[in-house]
Image (cartoon, helix red, strand yellow):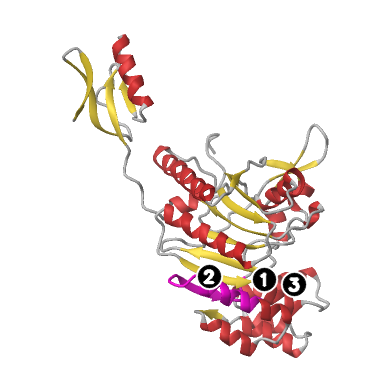
């Protein structure tokens, strides 16, 4: 094997795609800033116990691990930024009120999340800490939708779920962690046969509720069906009420519900959502409420947020037109160099043609040329 062949599901990003990703990064961070979100930049690696405490098995399996040569402690390369942002909120900012934070940076996965996914997503996300009300959930949903609109992605389907429903049906039963994971997997796969076997020892009301979840997906009518088919438990009633409230504030959108959806990381504790667009093999955006995520840092705060992979996003949105540029000759003349510098300071892209390369082209659309006319350097259309 050639030494320069990259590992599976790791790839270089070449100029046109890199430019598109960078433009999206700026647009989406600007959208978050418009809502009042502050940018943070957590490190790519940190102590393993900080990265993984309270996050569940899925994130642990996705995390690359290594030993710090300075301290001898175990380190992890982040597979998800949310625990890091929760640590920043809990220990570095330590604010008493609402904190709105956003971020964008690479994460690394030991395995691809989907057959053709990268193991090095460029994760962009936003989080609200300090507000337990649905107003924060709605704001995060609206910001995520605005981000997809800024990227010209659409039409968007928003799929809603709630982690409390399954948790309430399993609460109080003596199931091992392995059995709970198996139940979650069966629900995600909508495997009723496996679910029947796994729930054989549960009380009938809870068992029938878990089996009903396999069919509880579709439009808003799912919520009415759920009230009829699921046991009347306070957590389930609250979850269904909150899903209905959010649906009422998202009218005009293509909404769907999947009350058995547990995909993603284990820290979700309430309303969850995923956003899909045509051409995407999986959800472009995932998010929801995770009020427990800061507890391991000694400061449990209400929290809700979302994240997306810019590399996945760029693959399903329209490619932007090439940016126009000005072609200029290379030269040492002071007036030529001054003219080029002036144009660049005005925001223009000026490509100086190096000697001997006059016939070469690049990805910039040079629709104008800098020429000398009447003793002055002027820009003319090509």
Q: On the rendered structure, is 95 left or right of 311?
A: right
Q: Quadrant of the C terminus?
A: top left
Tell me which numbered mark, 1 or 3, is placed earlier along the sequence: 1
Q: Residues within 10 Å of mark 1 (few under 14, many from 20)?
A: many
Nearer to me, 21 or 121? 21
Residue indicated by mark 2: 159
Q: Which residues are magenta?
A: 239-261
Q: How far apart are the two marked residues, 1 and 2, measured between alpha carbons?
A: 13 Å
Label 1 secondary element: helix
Question: In the rendering, at what x and y percent does residue 244 appear?
Answer: 57, 77
Work out whether 238 lies above or below 127: below
The quadrant in which residue 182 appears is bottom right
Label 2 secondary element: strand
Q: Residues within 10 Å of mark 2 (few under 14, many from 20)?
A: many
Residue indicated by mark 1: 163
- What mark, if any, has residue 180 been given in the picture? 3
Work out whether 184 lies above or below 196: above
């Amino acid at each position: 094997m050639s030494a320069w062949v990259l590992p599976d599901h790791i790839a270089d990003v070449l100029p046109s795609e890199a430019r598109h990703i960078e433009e999206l990064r700026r647009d989406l961070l600007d959208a978050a800033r418009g809502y009042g979100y502050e940018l943070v930049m957590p490190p790519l690696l940190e102590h393993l116990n900080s990265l993984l405490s309270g996050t569940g098995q899925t994130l642990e399996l996705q995390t690359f691990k290594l030993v710090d040569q300075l301290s001898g402690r175990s380190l992890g390369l982040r597979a998800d930024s949310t625990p890091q942002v929760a640590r920043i909120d809990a220990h570095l900012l330590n604010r008493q009120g609402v904190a709105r934070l956003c971020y964008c940076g690479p994460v690394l996965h030991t395995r691809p999340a989907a057959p053709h996914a990268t193991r090095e997503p460029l994760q962009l996300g936003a989080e609200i800490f300090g507000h337990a009300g649905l107003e924060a959930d709605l704001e995060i949903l609206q910001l995520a939708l605005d981000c997809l609109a800024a990227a010209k992605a659409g039409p968007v389907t928003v799929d809603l779920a709630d982690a409390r429903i399954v948790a309430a049906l399993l609460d109080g039963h003596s199931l091992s962690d392995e059995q709970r994971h198996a139940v979650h997997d069966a629900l995600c796969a909508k495997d009723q046969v496996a679910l029947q076997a796994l729930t054989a020892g549960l009380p009938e009301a809870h068992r029938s509720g878990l089996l009903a979840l396999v069919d509880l997906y579709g439009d808003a009518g799912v919520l009415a069906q759920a009230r009829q088919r699921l046991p009347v438990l306070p957590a389930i009633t609250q979850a269904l009420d909150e899903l209905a409230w959010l649906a009422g504030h998202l009218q005009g959108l293509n909404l769907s519900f999947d009350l058995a959806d547990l995909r993603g990381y284990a820290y979700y504790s309430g309303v969850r959502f995923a956003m899909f667009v045509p051409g995407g093999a999986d959800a472009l955006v995932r998010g929801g409420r995770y009020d427990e995520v800061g507890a391991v840092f000694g400061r449990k705060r209400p929290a809700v947020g979302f994240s997306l992979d810019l590399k996945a996003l760029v693959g399903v949105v329209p490619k932007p037109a090439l940016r126009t540029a000005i072609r200029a000759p290379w030269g040492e003349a002071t007036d030529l160099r001054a003219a080029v510098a002036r144009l660049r300071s005005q925001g223009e892209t000026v490509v100086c043609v190096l000697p001997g390369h006059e016939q070469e082209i690049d990805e910039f659309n040079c629709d104008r040329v800098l020429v000398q006319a009447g003793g002055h350097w002027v820009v003319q259309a090509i």
